[in-house]
Image (cartoon, helix red, strand yellow):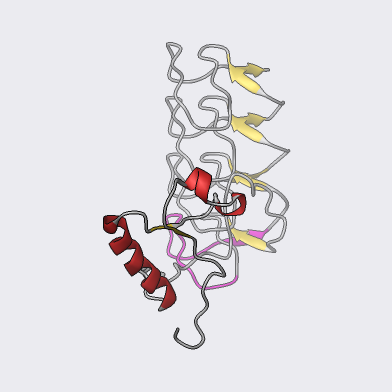
């Protein structure tokens, strides 16, 4: 055996009988090499030698390079960015590294962060440069008063989305607990179009 290579402590070999009766209880959950017939013996002998000399039949491909991740994650779970000292009121970028404003201008317009914020048009929160999807290229950030959802399509604040309730921009209202559309019974939380004869939902408290 090549020096430095490690093998499993046991390699079960089955020469005759059935696995249920011939293998001890502590080996029944293991893979075994079948030496019961000439056909299986040929295959199993090669597998045994591959184990011994550490030459697997199938080799795992090398792992690809890691993608570049942003240091600021904008998700629905991260809707209260209290940490940044400022943010661009057009695209939501926070200071830290050079970036181009995506809010219709080549330059940012940074203002001091005043607490939990979200764009009243598309629901995005500051942290990553983004274009507003609510009918404008730039965001319109507003202070959050808790958890909000769009009264037309059910989207909640946290990432830039387009309203599916017949408008390009959302109509956010305070979250009052579990709410559902009384027309189609959809729950708020994911942008959806009402299937109850209207393009927009009519949410009520659950």
x, y percent for residue 118? 61, 45
Q: Residue at x 57, y 70 (%)?
A: 9
Question: Is residue 102 covered in magenta?
Answer: yes
Seen in the image, is 142 located left or right of residue 134?
A: right
Residue depicted at 54% across the width and 69% down the height: 8
- Choose between 150 and 135: the one closer to the eye: 150
Q: Residue furthest bottom?
A: 3
Q: Quadrant of the C terminus?
A: top right
Residue 199 horizontal/vertical position (percent): 43, 19
User: Going 45% across and 51% down the picture, which residue do you hit?
Assistant: 131
Q: Main structural element of the magenta stretch: helix, strand or loop?
A: loop
Magenta residues, start to end? 96-112
Q: Is residue 62 visible?
A: no
Residue at the outermost front position: 16
* Residue 15, above or below 174: below
Give 176 or 7, whichever is nearer the viewer.
7
Residue situated in front as seen by the camera: 160 or 33: 33
């Amino acid at each position: 055996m090549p020096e430095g290579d490690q093998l499993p402590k046991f390699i079960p070999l089955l020469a005759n009988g059935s696995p249920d009766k011939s293998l001890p209880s502590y080996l029944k959950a293991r893979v075994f090499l079948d030496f019961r017939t000439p056909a299986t013996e040929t295959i199993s002998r090669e597998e045994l030698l591959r184990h011994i000399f550490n030459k697997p039949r199938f080799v795992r491909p090398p792992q690809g390079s890691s993608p570049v991740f942003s240091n600021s994650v904008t998700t629905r779970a991260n809707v209260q960015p209290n940490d940044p000292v400022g943010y661009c009121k057009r695209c939501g970028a926070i200071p830290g590294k050079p970036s181009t404003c995506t809010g219709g201008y080549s330059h940012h317009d940074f203002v001091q962060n005043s607490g939990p914020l979200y764009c009243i048009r598309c629901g995005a929160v500051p942290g990553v440069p983004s274009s507003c999807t609510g009918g404008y290229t730039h965001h319109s950030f507003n202070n959050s008063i808790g958890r909000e959802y769009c009264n037309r399509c059910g989207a909640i604040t946290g990432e830039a989305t387009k309203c599916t309730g017949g408008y390009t921009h959302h109509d956010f209202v305070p979250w009052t607990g579990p709410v559902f559309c009384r027309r189609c019974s959809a729950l708020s939380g994911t942008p959806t179009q009402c299937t109850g004869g209207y393009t927009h939902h009519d949410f009520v408290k659950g």
